[in-house]
Image (cartoon, helix red, strand yellow):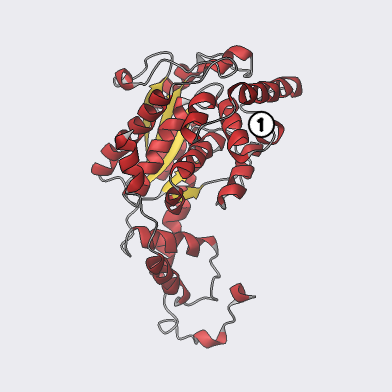
Amino acid sequence: MNELENILANIKALDLNLIHEGKAYCDNLAKPPGALGKMETIYARLYAMFNGRINLSKKVVMVYVADNGVVAEGISANPQETTAIVARNMLQGKTGLCVISKYKGSVVKVIDIGCLQDFSNRSFEKIRKGTGNILVEPAVSREEAIAAILLGYRRTLELIKEGYTLFGTGEMGIGNTTTSAAVISAVLSISPQEATGYGAGLTDRMKAHKVSVVQRAISYHAPFEDILDLVAKLGGLDILGMVGTHLACALHQLPCTVDGVISITGLLVASQLCPNVLDYAFASHMSMEPGYKKVCQFLNLSPMLLMDMRLGEGSGCPLAFSLMETAVYTLEHMPTYSQGKLNREDYVDIRKN
């Protein structure tokens, strides 16, 4: 625990003075104040992270692959072996995330943190082969939960040392919308019905069964000692690996984007461990899973895109990367009021109304 405690103790909040400096820069450009909306908000936060010298040239989506024991309860339409099949497809660049990433110029790193089948040359690092069935036993032990967070942290740190400066979190694991719904419901104290969706595709009858499983799992494991106890009992290794990525990015003051409901569950857990993590987090798109919107409201996050996407994998991250790069390029190449021969006093700042 000492290593994790040390990481958490050293994560600092973003410098508010630098954020205000970034906002002031945007407000001096030849346009109505605030006219570029979220592009300006994104820019100001990135400005603070990079101390005015924003560099998004090396981009990566980290995909954590893990199986979930709760699949035994029939909560997914897909067989468990789908996890390993899709993971191997990712290594060959044959998934939706991989295609989007290739087009947008970002890299995909696939990490076997808990797949039942070994699929990579670093599968020996995995914490265990699949989790326990959360309906009848903890997903993992507290020690395994910490080890999974630290594995995600170290793999992210490797990439930071290689020069990557813009990160995204993704996952692959049949049953992980069920574990995510359980964690979201328990952390936010909302009903499983509010947190549980159709996942990769369920009938109404199957969804009702999924809600029941989530409810019974929470009741079986409650009460919870703390956030680590909660996520160890109800969560998944993919969620825990993403926590590690958020911690590494926040410690090194680098931006990290989330994809869908499993990704945002990782951020939710990370924020419970250290609220400062949120200063470095960006929501890419509004997932179709109901728990996603609940977490966004809880964390005060505003997704960049509304695309009706439900692919998962991390597919929203490279799209967010593109918007972030566009924001930076646009704001750093626009003229100022004086350069554009405009008078700032002629514009009303509607943000004050």
Q: Amino acid at mark 1?
A: Thr
Residue appearing at x 39%, y 56% in the figure? 13
Task: In the displayed orientation, state which residue is furthest to the right.
Answer: 205
Quarter-of-image position of residue 290:
top right
Q: Is residue 211 left or right of residue 142?
A: right
Q: List x then y, in percent, for residue 343.
A: 50, 87
Determine whether 326 is above or below 230 in the image. Answer: below
Determine whether 53 is above or below 138 in the image. Answer: below
Toward the viewer: 307 or 199? 199
Q: List x then y, in percent, for residue 200.
A: 61, 26
Residue appearing at x 54%, y 21% in the figure? 174
How many numbered circles are shown?
1
Instruction: Name the residue that disc number 1 marks.
Output: 196
Asked if one can make out residue 215 in the rendered structure from this viewpoint, the answer is yes
Quarter-of-image position of residue 347:
bottom right
Quarter-of-image position of residue 210:
top right
Neighbourhood count class around disc 1 (C-alpha, 10 Å): few under 14, some 14–19, many 20 upward: many
Toward the viewer: 198 or 308? 198
Q: List x then y, in percent, for residue 299.
A: 55, 49
Determine whether 21 is above or below 167 in the image. Answer: below
Q: Is residue 236 left or right of residue 197?
A: left
